Amino acid sequence: MQKASFTFDAIVVGIGHAGIEAALALARKNHKTLALSVSLDNAGLLACNPSIGGTAKGHLVRETDALGGEMGKAADETCTHLRMLNASKGPSVQSLRAQIDKYRYHDRMKQTLENQPNLTLREGEVKQLICSRGRVTGVSTVAGLTYTAKTVVLACGVYLNSTVIIGSILLPRGPSGFARSEYLADSLIKHGITLQRFKTGTPARVKKSTVDTRVLEVQHGEDTPYSFSDAGETVPDKKGGVCYLGYTNAETHEIIRQNLQLSPKYGGLIHGAGARYCPSVEDKVVRFADKERHPFFLEEEGGKTQEMYVQGLSTGLPAEVQLDVYRSIKGMENVEIMRDAYAIEYECIDPLQLYPTLECKSIKGLFFAGQINGTSGYEEAAAQGLVAGINAARRLEGKDGLILPRESCYIGVMIDDLVTKGTQEPYRMMTSRAEYRLLLRQDNADLRLYEFARQAGLLSKERLSKAAQKRADILKGKARLKTRLPQKQVEAFFNAIGEPPAKSGATAEECIRRNAVTFAGYVNHFDTFADISPSAAYDIFLGVKYEGYIKREEAAADEARKVGDMPIPPETDFMRLNGLRIEAKEKLSKVSPRTVGQASRIAGVTPADINVLIISLKSKNGN
């Protein structure tokens, strides 16, 4: 009998959104990879809301796609409802959000993993992390199997010692009834990894036929050419679905207030830090007591189920109270709950223990990605998984890690925040976290990340060629901006949109600068960009519209890079640097920043400390 081989180049623990991207990246870089999960049925599980994208999260999906990730393609293929959030605002805060058929998404991702060459998919709970002389060497499972590898990516989501809480009921399990990881957290502690306990939650799932949707406001998807991925030439028709908008009321709030003592948070059962920007309905009633109502959305879980997700009404209240809360709402007087809402607590690591490559500082070859790093959200997880997978592959190949600067992408902002500042609550990506968000628009992700994508080596020649062609199209289009447009055509256009006439006609650039001129209006009326791609034309259009703001942000980003990119040698002993305050020495020693820019963002490190650091570095370099 031939003996089974348990030796791999890389092991990925977890096949949620982070694990999928990490495993695919490693396998596609021709490394023999094992993906382990407590259950194969949770591959790509949308355990909370059935959606991909949203404010700033849509940027992360676009950037993940630009680097060769899978989430954007899967979201496009399984989308049922699509909207551009903040469409009435500036382009820096516009974000794509899609409702997803969660069951089709799971099937699609599981099949992708199963059919990927160099990837072995295996069900099994990891019991121990195996290390030797400061390096990871493999893992062992509760079934008694040992797998060896030179790199390991831990993408365990919220499964480490997770506890589902419904009222006063504590259930030792993971999301959606899946088994939790019982032993790995203890193994991490034994290897010196510091853990912290966080909390999140999810609303009930209700039966659609028991909701009177006629009294709720219908939210239609948009018939637009938007997509998350640039992989395809055309965008499939995928905006036919609807969701429904409703509101809580005074009766709802009174039921919650009367039962606050039964809430696991207010009753003292929950000790983990919760997500500030995704509060439970109890938190909303307490924190915003002056509000007469709170909105919620009913979203379909999939095309072949009546289950609907009640976004905005997550709770940990007892099951019988949940029913009273939901039935107090207009349109839901006779609603049936199919799955109870719950809160969930879980272990995650302190991300200050990681380098910007997401490799552990104390154990070589060990990478962490996703919610185990203290983040919330599928999109944040997928982006980290891709970065961890790319860098695990580069370690196997003897290459330096790929670090994404915060000036270049939202992924870089997120990772820099995590490994420099840490997080005391589930971290959520927001546009306000980026200093140069007008430069980091979702429409130009492929341009911003082109060089990083080339280094990562995951994009096909066709995708790289497409990005290069977009660059060429932009140069071609920009050269036409000074072209004077036909005066009669300009007059008719300005008259139609209520703009004052141009006495001597107008160039393409002058026309675009007019306040009332939109991208759709311009391209439908003039053929300036007729022979170049719509995405390139849109980038040019925005470049003209926001030229002054963009130039200011570019100048600020360039200035920040000049100082921020100054490297700090890994062997630097901050405790021995004269002139630094004790607090700064301790904070710098804990984080071990790679650059002066990263050091400047550490809480407790002042500008004066940074000046001392720069002087010290220059003196050592003989400058």
Image (spheres, rainbow, N blue to C red):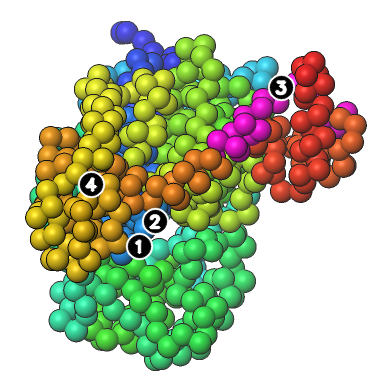
Q: Residue at x 12, y 48 (%)?
A: 486
Image: 25 above or below 597: above
- Residue labelled with disc 1: 89
The answer to whether residue 495 is seen in the rendering is: yes
Residue 74 in view, yes or no: no
The disc at residue 569 is 3
Residue at label 4? 507
Q: Is residue 447 left or right of residue 391?
A: left
Q: Circle 2 sits on which residue? A: 93
Q: Earlier in the sequence, mark 3 or mark 2?
A: 2
Kindly report the distance in space between the C-alpha atoms of the residues bearing marks 4 and 1.
26 Å
Asked if the residues shown at circle 3 and circle 1 are in contact, with their CB atoms under 8 angstroms apart, the answer is no
Report the span colored magenta.
557-576
Residue at the spot x=67%, y=25% of the render? 567
Q: Quick one: which residue is furthest to the front in this view?
A: 504
Q: Dot 3: what SS? A: loop
Mark 1 residue element: loop
Outermost top residue: 2
Q: Are marks 4 and 3 in contact (CB under 8 Å)?
A: no
Contact between labelled residues 2 and 3, with CB atoms less than 8 Å apart:
no
